[in-house]
Every structure is written in structure tokens, then in C-alpha cells.
Image: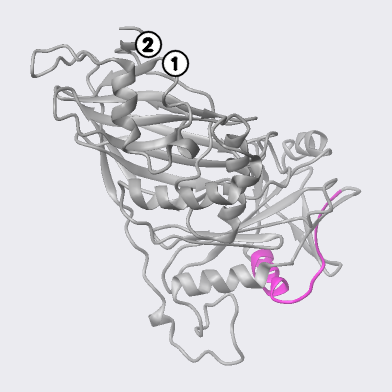
């Protein structure tokens, strides 16, 4: 039928934006406002771009309505030039950047600490900006050229060798300890290479360090980032790490046939009407649902199908709707997301730009378990601070261990 075809091959879509997964955090609210503006640019049903507050609210409603995966125990906070993201295993990642008005010398540091009383803090540094290509070319030469850490004009030595694979350099344990102390007070923190200096901001660091302490149960202990004059609690009270969920990806058989022996057939208008009831605010989350563009169908097993339709497109992002339905009545459609950007072999992905140049991204993955799609990964790449295209770091809020079977 016109506009509807059953395709055994996997489909691929352009990058989109994910508003329906955001928690009620200030830093994610900013993402949602930007994403909502992007949607609004191409939504004739929206009276004005100034309706963005309504869009944000509807996204929160959608998040609670279509959640199909375990609730994450993630913690997130962005304050001034620092942010923290703690995932569902209680691993916390703190990222700091240059001051926002210092765009000529972008720099970022990543501090990672797992949960548990004996967990150490490791640190990495990454440079960006106009001098990025020449600086990294020198760093890739190895031990002949390295960055040095200066705190309040005191030389704390060179970092470990630059990794050409990861694009960053590890800090030594001595440098990490000195940096953690400096971040609890007003300090001048610089990364120096030859005649160039990249200054790391300390603004907002104490707030995110305290948030990480809270997430890991370290407040009042000697292992806390922000320690009082006297630790009142034993490190034995620090929360233990949690195991990542074990998930099994079942790869659909593209050659599977319907167990009912009937060929799936439905008019596109009927299919659109069926899916409309699964979306809390279709004008916001899937304004293109009722248009005449084609649906794409992938068989998941002998009785279930994945159906896809373009939902929205903005200035630099787009979102595709993904639903699981039965191939015969009752169809029982289940919405996975209206923010998908790709589907391949049982894995749905959403990759969204925080802004057009793509120096910050938000990512979510769902995998097919044989009966439904469940979230397997959720992360951002940090602030939009021109560290590098594609984002500076991986800051997950939800992780899992995925095994594959056919």
C-alpha cells in the first residue's frame, strides 16, 4: 500500500534530539529548551516558538508515560563551569572547563571515582580550541612534548603521555591530589605547554564535589571531596558500588515469518491513528505523525513488528518514532521513543546535538530483549565548550552489561 512497506533490511535516520528522557535537573532543562526550539522550527501546529515552556512540560509528562526501562539512580548537577554525573552503579564523573568567556583556550578535566570506601580518584585532561591541531600534533610525538600542571604558579610536573587513541592525557596521582585540594578554594589552575597556557576554572567545583559526596554516601567521612574539620563518620558508611544490569540483546531474524501465516497489511492513515494514542502530546513530540511520508517496518519475531515514522525535524536535529506492535489484532502498540536516530539489528539509538556545531551530544540506546525494547545506555558528552566536535567526555547516567544472542 502507498506509504507502507515491509523492509527486511535495517533502516537508518539522521541525528535527532531526546527531550523525553530528561530528569528534573537544571542542566537538562537547558537541553530541553534548546531541543524544544529545534522541534518548534518545523512544527506548524505550534503557534509560536515562545510556547517552549509548554513543550518542556509535555516532555516531562511523556517521560513518565512512556518509560519502559528500570528507573535510574543517577545523580546530575551542573553549576557554573563544572558538572557531575553519577550513573546507576554509583560511579561519579566530574568534568570542569575553562571559564565560558575564555573560548580561545578551551580545556577540560575529568575526575572519576567509583563507589566504595577504598575507591581512588583518577583524572584526565583534554585540550581544544584554535590551537588544538598544532598542540595535539606535538603531544602525539610522545615524551618530547607534554603538558604541565600549574596551581597558583607552582609547577606540579608533567602529565602522563598523551593518548592518541583517547585524545587526552592522564594526570599523575600527585597532580590529582593537588587539584582536588585546589578546587575546594579559589585557585589559579593552568595547563601549560611551551608558550601556551590553558586555564581551568574552579567556579562551581565545590557544588558538584558535594553532590558527588552525597551520591556516594561520603559526606562527613575522610574520603569526601568536601571534608569538614573533623570527619564524624567512618568510611565504612560509604555506599558500595552497584552492579550494572545484565541485559541480553536478542538479534531479530530478518527472515522470520509470521506465526499467523498472514501478511501484515494496514493503511498508513490507520497506522498513524493507532500510534497517535500512545503519544501524550502528539503536536509536540510527533507533529509529522499524520503526514503522508512512508512507514518503515522491521520484523522482530514471529508475532511482533517494529514500526517507524519520522516524527519531527528542526534546524540541526530530527526525531523518528519507534513502536512495537503485534502483527495481528490486538495490535497493542507500545511507544519506545519519538527521538530515535538509528535502528540496527535490535538496537535503537538516539544521538542529539546540544547545538549545531556538535561539540556536545546526548545519547540513549535501547536493545531488543526478545519481548520488548529496554534502555541499555544513557549519557551526555558534557558541556558545549568547544573542546572537540563530538563532545569532550562520556558522562553516563545509565549503564548496563549487554550480551548478545540470536
Q: Which mark is residue 91?
A: none
Q: Is residue 183 magenta?
A: yes
Q: CA distance from mark 1 to mark 2?
A: 6 Å
Residue 314, percent across and down? 60, 30
Residue 81, percent across and down? 71, 60
Asked if labels 2 and 1 touch by Cβ distance under 8 angstroms, the answer is yes
Residue 146 placement, left or right of 74:
right
Q: Residue at x 82, y 67 (%)?
A: 188
Q: Residue at x 60, y 36 (%)?
A: 40
Task: Give the farthest residue toward the left.
Answer: 260
Stretch of the chain drawn in magenta: 174-193
Residue, disc 1: 293
Q: Residue at x 11, y 13 (%)?
A: 262
Q: Is residue 286 above or below residue 68?
A: above
N-terminal of the pair, mark 1 or mark 2, is 2
Residue 135 placement: quadrant: top right
Residue 28 placement, left or right of 138:
left
Q: Is residue 336 above or below residue 191?
A: above
Other-residue count near label 2 (Cα within 10 Å), few / some / many at <14 / 14–19 / ≥20:
few
Residue 286, percent across and down? 45, 33
- Element type where label 1 sits in the image: loop
Q: Is residue 230 above or below residue 223?
A: below
Residue placed most toward the observer, 298 or 48: 48
Q: Which mark is residue 3?
A: 2
Residue 361 placement: quadrant: top right
Residue 300, percent across and down? 23, 24
Residue 39 placement, left or right of 190:
left
The quadrant of the picture occupied by the N terminus is top left
- Element type where label 2 sits in the image: loop
Task: Give the farthest residue toward the top.
Answer: 1
The quadrant of the picture occupied by the C terminus is top left
Amino acid at each position: 500500500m502507498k506509504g507502507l512497506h515491509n523492509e527486511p533490511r535495517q533502516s537508518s535516520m539522521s541525528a535527532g534530539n531526546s527531550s523525553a528522557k530528561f530528569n528534573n535537573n537544571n542542566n537538562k532543562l537547558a537541553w530541553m529548551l534548546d531541543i524544544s526550539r529545534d522541534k518548534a522550527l518545523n512544527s506548524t501546529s505550534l503557534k509560536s516558538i515562545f510556547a517552549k515552556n509548554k513543550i518542556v512540560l509535555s516532555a516531562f509528562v511523556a517521560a513518565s508515560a512512556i518509560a519502559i526501562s528500570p528507573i535510574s539512580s543517577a545523580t546530575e548537577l551542573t553549576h557554573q563551569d563544572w558538572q557531575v554525573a553519577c550513573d546507576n552503579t554509583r560511579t561519579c564523573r566530574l568534568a570542569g572547563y575553562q571559564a565560558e568567556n575564555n573560548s580561545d583556550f578551551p580545556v577540560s578535566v575529568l575526575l572519576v571515582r567509583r563507589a566504595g570506601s577504598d575507591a581512588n580518584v583518577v583524572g584526565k585532561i583534554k585540550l581544544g580550541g584554535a590551537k588544538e591541531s598544532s598542540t595535539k600534533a606535538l603531544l602525539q610525538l610522545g615524551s618530547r612534548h607534554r603538558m604541565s600542571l600549574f596551581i597558583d604558579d607552582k609547577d606540579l610536573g608533567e602529565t602522563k603521555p598523551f593518548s592518541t587513541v583517547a585524545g587526552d592525557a592522564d594526570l599523575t596521582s600527585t597532580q590529582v591530589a593537588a587539584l582536588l585540594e585546589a578546587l575546594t578554594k579559589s585557585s589559579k589552575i593552568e595547563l601549560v605547554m611551551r608558550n601556551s597556557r590553558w586555564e581551568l576554572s574552579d567556579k562551581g567545583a565545590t557544588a558538584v564535589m558535594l553532590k558527588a559526596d552525597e551520591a556516594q554516601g561520603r559526606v562527613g567521612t575522610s574520603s569526601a571531596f568536601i571534608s569538614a574539620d573533623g570527619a564524624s563518620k567512618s568510611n565504612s558508611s560509604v555506599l558500595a558500588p552497584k552492579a550494572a544490569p545484565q541485559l541480553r540483546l536478542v538479534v531479530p531474524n530478518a527472515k522470520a515469518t509470521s506465526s499467523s501465516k498472514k501478511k501484515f497489511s494496514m493503511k498508513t492513515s490507520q497506522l498513524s491513528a493507532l500510534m497517535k494514542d500512545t503519544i501524550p502530546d502528539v503536536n509536540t513530540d510527533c507533529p509529522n505523525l499524520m503526514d503522508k511520508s512512508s512507514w518503515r517496518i522491521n520484523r522482530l519475531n514471529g508475532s511482533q513488528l517494529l514500526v517507524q515514522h519520522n516524527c519531527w525535524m528542526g534546524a540541526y536535529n530530527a526525531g523518528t518514532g519507534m513502536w512495537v506492535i503485534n502483527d495481528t489484532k490486538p495490535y497493542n502498540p507500545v511507544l519506545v521513543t519519538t527521538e530515535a536516530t538509528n535502528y540496527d539489528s535490535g538496537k535503537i539509538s538516539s544521538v542529539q546535538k546540544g547545538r549545531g556545531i556538535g561539540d556536545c551530544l546526548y545519547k540513549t540506546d535501547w536493545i531488543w530483549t526478545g519481548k520488548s525494547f529496554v534502555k541499555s545506555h544513557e549519557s551526555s558528552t558534557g558541556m558545549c565548550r568547544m573542546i572537540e566536535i563530538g563532545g569532550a567526555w562520556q558522562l553516563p547516567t545509565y549503564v548496563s552489561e549487554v550480551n548478545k544472542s540470536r
